[in-house]
Amino acid sequence: MYATIHEFRSQDSDVRSCLPPGARPIGLIALDDVQQPGRGTAVALWDDEPIGEGRSYRVTDQFSGRSTGRRPLFAQVTWLNGDGDPARADAAEHGGRHRIWPAVQQIEGIVDVFALRSADDRIVVIGLATGTETYEQVQAAVLGSRPLPDEDPALLRGADRIDQARVLFAELPSAVRS
């Protein structure tokens, strides 16, 4: 599965207007930025890698939380590795799978988590949750986790940016829901 990320003004009547004409994604997540209300982000999910302008991401991991099946109300979008360092991208993926997800997977309120990686090694993690308190619990669990013996602390520099958003809607493909 692949993803593309698009900006829109949340007062637009149709979020899909930010997608390329005629585009038919298999899923769409629409978010309204908490810090800048009216600024929206749409995450379109695709079966195949989309061809066209803009960066596309491969969905490298999808995790279902304890609240899967519930309607997500909030999202956190974490941007990592803005410089495109392949070693840092590999470290982020490894840490996400083997340290961070095991540390947070039992937190109530996590609906779904999508880890995305672009061809130029940028990482974006989208966490969908039922409440904002979930992110406080996730942050505490992540900060309380120790690097694994095979992790290089020099590559674990943290997020470049973290956006908090309200979920306007999340139309997820059925394969993700199962």
Image: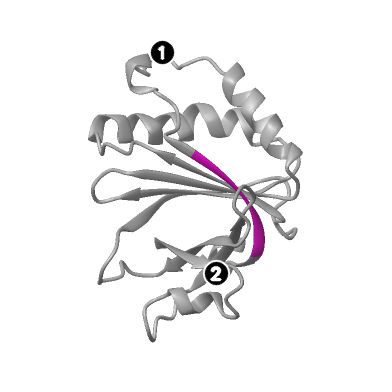
User: Element type at marker 2?
Assistant: loop
Q: Amino acid at mark 2?
A: Pro
Q: Residue at x 33, y 16 (%)?
A: 154
Q: Residue at x 24, y 51 (%)?
A: 119
Q: Identify the disc placed on residue 149.
A: 1
Q: Amino acid at mark 1?
A: Pro
The residue that mark 2 highlights is 173
Q: Identify the disc placed on residue 178.
A: none
Task: Magenta stretch: give its range.
Answer: 162-168
| Image label count | 2
Residue 90 on image: x %, y %: 31, 34
Q: Is residue 29 above or below residue 120?
A: below
Residue 138 on image: x %, y %: 65, 32
Residue at the extreme bottom of the image, as rendered:
22
Residue 177 on image: x %, y %: 61, 62
Is 115 left, or right, of 139 in this rendering?
Answer: left
Q: Residue at x 44, y 81 (%)?
A: 24
| For marks 1 and 2 on the same chain, the one whose residue lies earlier in the sequence | 1
Q: Is residue 157 above or below residue 28?
A: above
Q: Label 1 neighbourhood size at 10 Å, few (<14), some (14-19), many (20+)?
A: few
Is 33 left, or right, of 66 in this rendering?
Answer: left
Q: Is residue 163 magenta?
A: yes
Q: Nearer the viewer, residue 172 or 134?
A: 134
Main secondary structure of the magenta stretch: strand
Q: Is residue 91 magenta?
A: no
Q: Is residue 103 above or below residue 64?
A: above
Question: For residue 176, which quarter of the picture?
Answer: bottom right
Residue 120 on image: x %, y %: 23, 47
Is 63 left, or right, of 61 in this rendering?
Answer: right
Q: Label 2 neighbourhood size at 10 Å, few (<14), some (14-19), many (20+)?
A: some
